[in-house]
Amino acid sequence: MSLDLSYYEALMGVAAAGEQPTTATGGVWVVALAGRLDDGLLRLIGKGRVLADALGAYVHLLMAGEAEAADGNRAIQAGADRVWLARGTPALADLVEFFRPRGPQVVLFPFREISRFATRLGRTLGPGLAQALNGSLCARAADLEVDPIYQRVVAHQPVLDDAARQRVALLASPAVAVVDTTLLPAAFNEPWRTGTIEDTGLTWPAPPPSQPLPQFGGGVRGEGRGGGAAPLTLANAAVIVAGGLGLKSAEGFALAARLAQALGAAVGGDMAALDAGWISEDQLIGLAGARSFAKFRERAPRLFLALGMDGDTGLFMSIQDAGLVVAVQPDPSAPIAAVADYNIYADPVEFARVLLGKLQR
Amino acid sequence: MRIVVCVKQTYDPATVKISRSREEFDLRGAVKIMNPADKHALEAALRLREAAGGEVVALTVGDADAEDVGREAIAMGADRALLIAGPELAAATGRAVAKALAAGIGHLAPVDLVLVGQAAAVDGTGGLAPRLAAALGWPVALDVLPSLSPSSSPSPNLGGGVGVGAEVGAVEAVAVVDPGVGEAISLPLPAVVAIVAGAERPRYPQPARIANAWAPGLLAICTASDLGLTAEDLAPDVEVGGLVLPPERTRGQVITGPLDAAVDELWTVLQAQRLIPAAAA
């Protein structure tokens, strides 16, 4: 394995004239298929940079789609040594043909891309590439590191609905990982980095026209759903906004519901909200709504925003798996103050108005 | 048409605990079940068989315990099951499992459609369907809702389909793109389809079918060497290590100050954890 000098050259601020990266094989490859660089891909390039520095390798970026040189420069600032441009969307066979002679050490795909209809590309092509090249795979990685002793890539794979992560050492080469970029640290932006941009001259066929079904599926209130996708409920929402009597009035609760819509969240409430007629029974959170409690376990929310709720044991049992609990209510001695990760002692209606204004800005 | 459903035996995630050392799973009380996503795939296959006729075969790779899953699939309505078992498969990783399943599908040829659950419970990643498709050289679709409908004319939508002895043209389906957004797809057969949970619940086995699931001849067991798999094919591609747990939570933090400043501070916290939608961030 040759020593990768590009990083040190970059640190010194000099690009050795005529000494461009010459390695024909190996390296850490990042594959961008949507044709545009979003923040997630830049973070992935940064992660590739960290891996490459530990492995003594170069970072290559393969950009398919309508890639532009300006994007290439941004990718170099984010840590890429060499950017390869191509047009269209590769099929698995194209990608295998591209990578087989280059013998990559590591290939990273984003789990989710900026373009809606490209979201499945990385998840389809990454595992396929691993199988076709007889490599190893982590089909969903939250983080990656290099084992300092064995110099092999170790992926952190979410298990038990992200309650924990499992270390998975990728033994066979190439090590392919489909990386959930939302969980990676911020992207590098280092203007002194240098690299090359190269046009592969490859033109793959344009992606097949997708047939979106915009009327399919439900929104927050479950309207207009017909296709059978799971609607957003307390059981499956990533974010839940819950209201209690502290919201004082139906208008206050309606504001909380609008906040939920802006956050892409499901709306719930406690027994008091049910008694006040602000929520229906299937929106009840707590042990009294036994079904709600049971259904809650389908998927724990990542954020639980409690507005005007004092909290009781039933509520705390229901939200014990929630990722982040934020409570907004005026009383510092309320039981929920000790349970919530963050407390804001304020009028919940006023809080909802301020946060909604900030979200809509 | 012959539909193969790949079913997996997993631990019930509700019974899997994390050990006191916080470095590994505590599986002492864990219960083995059929992977919930695979149940949806089996339900989709049974409904497709009701619509288009044909045969549903459950295929599973694992140790001897995995026979239970094959019997359960028969009880739910599969016509028969094939279990690829053996000590050399007990520690098989994704690459080896995909090769074993591909060999099993070759053994069951001609196969028109392969359904798998999108991801396994506990530690699934959704890598099987594309791996299997790559091993077979077939097209693949992910995140597909269980309501599949047979179609006589293949559409060029996905392209690249390799027609190996396919007689039924294609399958029409809906893939979930985002929560609430679907995409109509048409897959030329043969193909591999990964099924996600939809509105339909997987059926419960009828008592008579449960009793009859143990009738002789319904479940065939073969070993990896029967299918021509070598030790090289079954070599592990990954090594599973310990668990990494998130740091302990600090509860009861208070954000003080005027409301505007407090909301700004909370905003920073939510953005750092990427809990605010991208459009708003």
Image: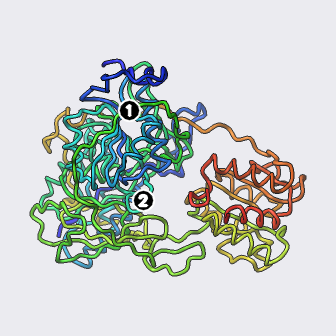
A213 left or right, relative to A203: right
How many residues crowd around disc 1 within 10 Å: few (fewer than 14), some, or many (20 or more)?
many
Q: As shown in the figure, which amino acid type bears the numbered disc 2? A: Ser
* Residue bearing mark 1: A195
Q: Is residue B214 visible?
A: no
Vertical side of A284 occupied by A61: above or below = above
Q: Nearer the viewer, residue A180 or A282?
A: A180
Vertical side of B242 occupied by A279: above or below = below
Q: How is the image coloured?
A: rainbow
Q: Nearer the viewer, residue A88 or A100?
A: A88
Label 2 residue SS: loop
Q: Determine the chain carrying the residue at label 2.
A: A
Q: Determine the chain carrying the residue at label 1.
A: A
Tell me the quarter of the image containing the C terminus of chain A.
bottom right
The residue located at (64%, 74%) in the rendering is A282
Instruction: Specify the quadrant of the image occupied by residue A177.
Output: top left
x, y percent for residue A261: 64, 69
* Residue bearing mark 2: A115
The residue located at (52%, 36%) in the rendering is A188
Q: As shown in the figure, which amino acid type bears the numbered disc 1? A: Gly
Label 1 residue SS: loop
x, y percent for residue B255: 81, 48
The residue located at (43%, 53%) in the rendering is A112
Q: Are marks 2 and 1 in contact (CB under 8 Å)?
A: no
Tell me the quarter of the image containing the N terminus of chain A.
top left
A345 left or right, relative to B200: right
Q: Is residue A266 visible?
A: yes
How many residues crowd around disc 2 within 10 Å: few (fewer than 14), some, or many (20 or more)?
few
